[in-house]
Amino acid sequence: MVIAGCSAGRAAEPVADATPSAPTTPATSVASSAPPVDAGRLRLALLPAPQGMRVVHGPETGAFGSLESTKKGLAAARQVSLARPECAGAAQLDAGEPALANAPAAVVAYASDRGSITQALVAMPSPVFPPPLPAQCADYTADVEGTRVTYGTRQLTMPRQGDESRAYLTTAVGGGQNAQVGSVVIRRGNVILSLLVVGRKVKSGGLFQLAQVADRQLAKISR
């Protein structure tokens, strides 16, 4: 699928029309450490299957860098040739960072005929938040298995979730196909929540609603 060159969290391969469906530069430190959260507790905070969607991966728990979903995402990214290599995973969590690779995590992915949703929760040693997308990464091209794909990304004005949050909408066009990816990253305490919603058309309102539900789930284990 043309969207393969635009991983946003590298959690799992599939992602739905965002009607309630693991980011690569180093995350920046924002506060002092908080009590640790293990992978078992993170699993309790994952979204349940949305109506009409089926589980296609997970729930999977463990160290973020050791998860099969993370490994598959990184392997897929290595097959993509970017016109701007610095944009690979920009504004996302870098699974190559030792602190992140060793951090407890939980991942799940759902899909339907309309698209898919992937969620990752990662408990960092201290509160961090990925930096925003660099300006030069708003538009770029990539070669995905011999197909030239054009990506365009814009930041969305989403009501704040958790302690910090950010959302983007990416459109990918290539090979006679087009798709959209809605991506959300939320920090609540030491936990980073990543959501990827992929479909032919991703609606910002549905994406925001999903992010709110996901943040409420996370808040239950953060008290």
Image (tube, rainbow, N blue to C red):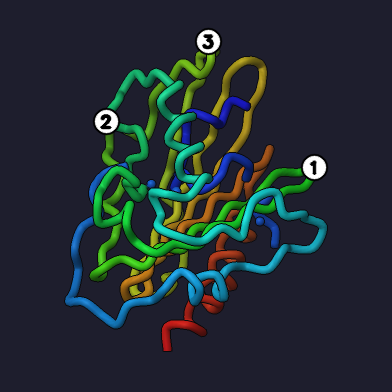
x and y percentages locating residue 70 in the rendered image: 46, 45
Against 63, is 6 above or below?
above
Residue that appears at 41% across and 54% down: 64
Give the residue number, with chain letter if any, for mark 1.
113
Question: As drawn, is 55 to the left or to the right of 206?
Answer: right
Give the residue number, with chain letter if any, for mark 2.
86
Q: Earlier in the sequence, mark 3 or mark 1?
A: 1
Question: As drawn, is 121 to the left or to the right of 55?
Answer: left
Against 109, is 139 above or below?
above
Residue that appears at 58% across and 52% down: 118
Cα gap from disc 2 to disc 3, whole angstroms: 20 Å
- At label 3, counting other C-alpha atoms closer than 10 Å, the crowd grade (few under 14, some 14-19, many 20 or more) is few
- At label 2, counting other C-alpha atoms closer than 10 Å, the crowd grade (few under 14, some 14-19, many 20 or more) is few
Q: Earlier in the sequence, mark 2 or mark 1?
A: 2
- Residue in front for this viewpoint, 158 or 113: 113
Any part of residue 157 in sight: no
Q: Which mark is residue 146?
A: 3
Which secondary structure lies at badge 1?
A: loop
Against 85, is 223 above or below?
below
Tag count: 3
Amino acid on which disc 2 is placed: Glu
